[in-house]
Image (cartoon, rainbow, N blue to C red):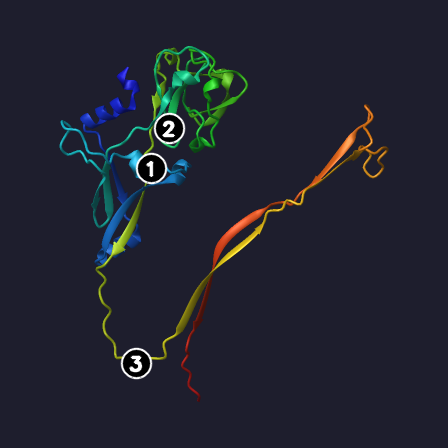
Amino acid sequence: MNWTKSSFLMNKIYENGFVLEYTIDNPEDVIDAIKNGKTIIPVLNIDNETIRHGGSDMIPEYFFNYDPLPEGLPPDLPATPKYILNDENITIRALPKLNTLLNNSFKKELSFAYPPEIPLVRPGFDSLSYSLFQRESGVNRGVGYPPDPFYYDRRTIDYDQIENIEGMLKPGFLVTVTEPETTDEPSEKIQIGYGTFANAGAISIRFWYPIRIDYYATGGITPSPSVTPTPTPPVPTVSNGTSQQTDFFMEPDAECVIKADERGDEKFDVEQGIPVRESLYVNAQVREYLFDVSYTEHTHSETEYVKVKKT
């Protein structure tokens, strides 16, 4: 089915003119810089701390579209993220990308046959979410998630902890539910969906777009009023230097002793033979760590002249 392909879903989003739009208040120092006539250049970045993910793919080009758009789409779509900077705030408009795992899907992670094709979101770009219910009463218990660093403080549901196509969970672990309050429940009391898991009705696909705006200011600085010149003191002297330094210790100095118990009261020499029913002890010693480093040493010295007057 086409809807299981992220490219199909992304095109449908674009065709319907959906645009991510953020309006963010400017920091006070940025507002002051604008008032003082400086030119502000905003730069869009991804806030890794929010999603607790790192890596080379945590960059705007993987979250937002930067590619030329095909013909036939609404004309006002931003092909790349656009900024509208005002005195008090900034508005960002961008088209989202949908990042899913290739050659993998929800059904491939399960231990039982599951007909629907549901794509898996790449780690760091969000995840699936489950609609949870009380097994006996059918009362909705909120939302649950598969494991992800973002949900570090929640009891998540791994794929192999789902027992069958009815959405029952295997017993023996805790699950965090969010309704009527956030709490942990035994897995045997909770299920995914209530008669809807088999047809994918209890599963949603979520995507994150956490942004951070870095501001850079250039130019527009008003010159300070001129003052009556005073005698110029000698120019302070400053010297800087660098030198390449290396240091290493890569010898482990390992020692190992194998002897007969008791330690310090050995009953036989293991080099001569080991009786079948006797026990041995092993004592190994090695340096705590090895290192091989290269670094640049920076030196700085400065001379200041101070004018004094004798009275």
Q: Check residue 210 in the rendering and tell me which mark sits there, or answer none.
A: 1
Query: Is 85 in front, or is 241?
Result: 241
Circle 3 sits in a helix, a strand or a loop, which is it? loop
Image marks 1 and 2: residues in contact by CB distance under 8 Å = no
Say which quadrant the C terminus sits in: bottom left
Circle 2 sits in a helix, a strand or a loop, which is it? loop
Query: Is 195 in front, or is 95?
Result: 95
Say which quadrant the N terminus sits in: top left
**Type of amino acid at the residue the image marks with label 3:** Thr
Circle 1 sits in a helix, a strand or a loop, which is it? loop
Graded by Cα atoms within 10 Å as few (under 14), some (14 to 19) or many (20 or more), the crowding at tag 1 reads some
Mark positioned earlier in the residue sequence (1 or 2) = 2
167 up-or-down from 277: above or below: above
Q: Check residue 122 in the rendering and tell me which mark sits there, or answer none.
A: 2
Residue highlighted by disc 3 = 230
Number of marks in the image?
A: 3
| Dot in front, 1 or 2 | 2
- Residue at 47% of width from left, 22% of height from top? 158
- Residue at 44% of width from left, 32% of height from top? 149
> Is residue 64 left or right of 138 when viewed as pictured?
left
Graded by Cα atoms within 10 Å as few (under 14), some (14 to 19) or many (20 or more), the crowding at tag 2 reads some
Graded by Cα atoms within 10 Å as few (under 14), some (14 to 19) or many (20 or more), the crowding at tag 3 reads few
Residue 77 visible within the image? yes
Query: Is 194 in front, or is 72?
Result: 72
**Type of amino acid at the residue the image marks with label 2:** Arg
